[in-house]
Amino acid sequence: MSSVTPQVQPRVLPAGFDERTFNATLNAMVEVVGKENVSIDGRDGALEGAQGQKFYGDIWPMAEEDQHAPSAAIRPQTVPELQKILKIANRYKLPLWTISRGKNLAYGGSAPIVRGTVVLDLHRMNKIVEVNEEYAYAIVEPGVSFFDLYNHIVEKGYDVWPSVPALGWGSVLGNTTERGFGYTPYGEHALHQCGMEVVLPNGELLRTGMGAQKDSPMFPLYKGGYGPSVDGLFYQSNLGIVTKIGIHLMPAPTHFLDCSVSVPNEGDLEVLVSKIARLERDNVIQNHTSVANLWRQAMMHPDPKIHEVAIGPGMKKGESADNTALAALQKEQGWGFWKGYFAIYAQSGTLAHANWDLVQKAFAGVSGAVCTCSEYSGKDGAKLRMTDTPEGEIPHNGMPRMTPIGMVNVRGYGGGHVDFSPLFPAGGKELSAWYIKARDSIKEAKLDFFSDFHVMGRYINGIICIVYGPTEGPRAKEVFEKLLKDARDNGNTTEYRTHIDFMDHVADAFTFEDSALRRFVTDLKHHMDPNGILSQGKSGIWSKRKLTSVL
């Protein structure tokens, strides 16, 4: 078997490694996965990025110096290969950073927290193990994208709809274990995960729930298993490597209503989200609602002329959008300042129309509220196929797409975005108060507020997509830090998920009983991964063999 040719000056080395030891480690990896599946400097081998990038790391860094540069990348294809890699990593104490497909956009991409860490890229582990139409579930490996799962379902003609996020190129498994979400009634993916297969840091193979019983047909059907449930230990975690999950799918409806409700004024946010949340808790609206502000509506519009108005001359000079131009655009287009997108799904037209009537009734007393919907139904009462519905602005119909990715270039080609993702109660009062302060902070930074608020019935994920140009990363990072501090100090909240630059900062907010939860998880990390080889610093979790943090 071929070996790695030693580099004279490797760009970066793992902490504690000299060049000779590092190359010996990579040569051992080559014996497992082949030379073509070892990138010796992290500069190639990744799945292609939004602007054609094939390197590992954060394609949209917010700092001028690359603090998160990986030293190499390894791409196994099977569980046995992965187990052998972990054996080698433990022998050499080689730090690894696990990714599924590396599409963790706005949160750091495929970059590790600790500079010099080797990326463990699982995108070649891409089997759709099973899709079961009768019980509406799938079992997938880390490399399976939402496009892959959707295409498989369409090709087989199954009457099930997957839940997909805003961009379809990401990993079903990776999105789920990061507590990501999609847009059908099964959109809170972590709630609909059932069964995990995990390779532990020492290479042992574990199945959770009913998977712990050999060959159990209940593995993807009943999550609880027997005794303690441990699935949650592997969410946003570095305690193991998830190699398979079961995920529940939505049985195809016969009727689908793609809906929206808009309100005219900026001050109407509280009434909008509070009424939507009540409708969700009452199961009138079955999926969660995505709430857009005026600028987002303009930027997501299919007409490029509207984009030009929204961008305006100011943005092209590194300023924020012109509020006067946006207000004129709102009046011209007849838009509300806020617009909530949701859907209604039913097995009969009677049920669908009854729920739609309840939505309209709920907003009848809200001045200027406008409710709209487009209806689709299966022919002669048959199940509705996803392909019989158009691509919408929001993928309520389970059809993945990549359309929104273009927004990252509005401030110049090669730009990016970072998501700030705080949590609030669903009543809307706390969100509205926070919004005013966050809006002003974004404006002061000469950037724009792109609201991607997700109303989940009992809570709101108040995501802001902060879009920045190729040279504006440091400014985006500065305002992000301000938002994070303000949310913690004045709102008693923090993010559900964050960029790799801020994982320790978010973990620092969980201080109940002298940070008892963090200490508990740190103890688990120490016992499960004493050599500290897996994803050091992930979610603020470090082993006691703590490598140098870049934070």
Image: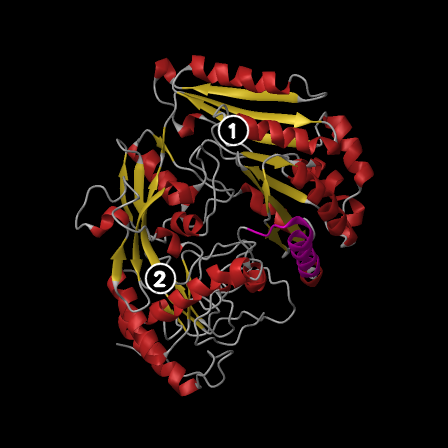
| Left or right of 228, for residue 545 | right
Please report the bounds of the magenta region as a residue range: 476-495
Disc with the residue nearer the chain's start (1 vs 2): 2
Give the residue type at disc 2: Gly
- The numbered mark at residue 218 is none
Helix, strand or loop at mark 1: helix
Dot 2 corresponds to which residue? Answer: 240
User: Could you tell me the amino acid type at mark 1?
Assistant: Glu
Q: Against 262, is 108 above or below? A: below
477 falls in the magenta region = yes
Q: Is residue 392 above or below residue 166?
A: above
Q: Where is residue 380 in the image (x, y as percent from the top left)?
A: 36, 13
Category of crowding for the residue at label 2, using alpha-carbon neighbours closer than 10 angstroms: few (below 14), some (14–19), many (at least 20):
many
Residue 539 visible in this rendered orientation of the protein: no
Residue 280 tag number: 1
The residue shown at (28%, 67%) is 203
In-front residue for pair 545/175: 545
